[in-house]
Image: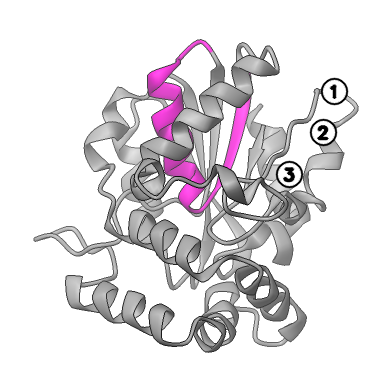
Amino acid sequence: MFAHGYGCDQSMWRYVAPDFAEDYSILTFDHVGNGGSDSTAFDPAKYAKLQGYADDVVEIAREANVRGGVFVGHSVSAMIGVLASIQAPELFDELVLVCPSPCFLNDGDYIGGFSESDVDELLASMADNFAAWSNTMAPAIVGNGGRPELGQELAAAFCRMDPEVARVFARATFTSDNRSDLPHVLARALVVQCRDDILAGEHIGAYVAANIPDAALVVIDATGHCPNLSAPDAVTAAIKAFI
């Protein structure tokens, strides 16, 4: 089961998921409010917290009769997968967490990368001009400045979101703190970490791996926050070696 990151859709896995089709049943989907999902299903109260998205993952997996499966979550979906696996541990025996962050906010010795004022400014910028925010942020998030088409693809995905949905999802993403959830994960886990990731640095990947009871960390030969686009072969190889 492949879950996409903030503002994306299931097409972000198009270079990775097919490589597993010979040995596994593949399930991809769009989070509510993203991609081709039913926009009328978006409930601002439900999706104000990541648990709302985790509830959907559990519902989808049960509908598809998943049991003992592998959940692959990119970015915010890594923590959504963590929550889903805690809620329904029978669904997933293994979690693959690609560029995860359990908390984007700085807190004492923990450096998540953002202060509360940083997040407030980010959300205000989105509210002021969402298209401009998307076109500025997407290339920085993707990295790989020599491949501008990757940033353009992410920016286009952002711009397809309803701005209000985007703000609700962004607030849930950047203000959540899932550090205390990590020790409760029963599944085996693999943290897939990139270099030069402005959203989830190497120390954060190491933190996630250290706080999940049965977890391994692999730093792949990739930069930026979206290796499923920029380095899909490295992501695929890491997953195959794990499962």
Amino acid beneath label 3: Ala
Percent position of residue 235, x then y: 68, 50
Q: Is residue 215 visible?
A: no
Is disc 2 placed on a helix, strand or loop? helix
Few, some or many residues within 10 Å of mark 3 (<14, 14–19, 20+): few
Spatial CA span between label 1 and label 2: 6 Å
Cβ–Cβ under 8 Å for marks 1 and 2: yes
Is disc 1 placed on a helix, strand or loop? loop
Cβ–Cβ under 8 Å for marks 1 and 3: no
Q: Image height check: is 3 above or below 150? A: above
Which residue is under mark 2? Answer: 20
Question: Is the N terminus in the top left, top right, bottom left or bottom right quadrant?
Answer: top right
Q: Image height check: is 229 above or below 41? A: below
The numbered dot on residue 23 is 1
The numbered dot on residue 237 is 3
Which dot, 1 or 3, sits closer to the camera? 1
Amino acid beneath label 1: Asp
Percent position of residue 112, x then y: 27, 62
Spatial CA span between label 1 and label 3: 14 Å
Q: Which residues are magenta?
A: 69-90
Few, some or many residues within 10 Å of mark 1 (<14, 14–19, 20+): few
Which dot, 3 or 2, sits closer to the camera? 2
Is disc 3 placed on a helix, strand or loop? helix
Residue 196 falls within the magenta-colored stretch = no
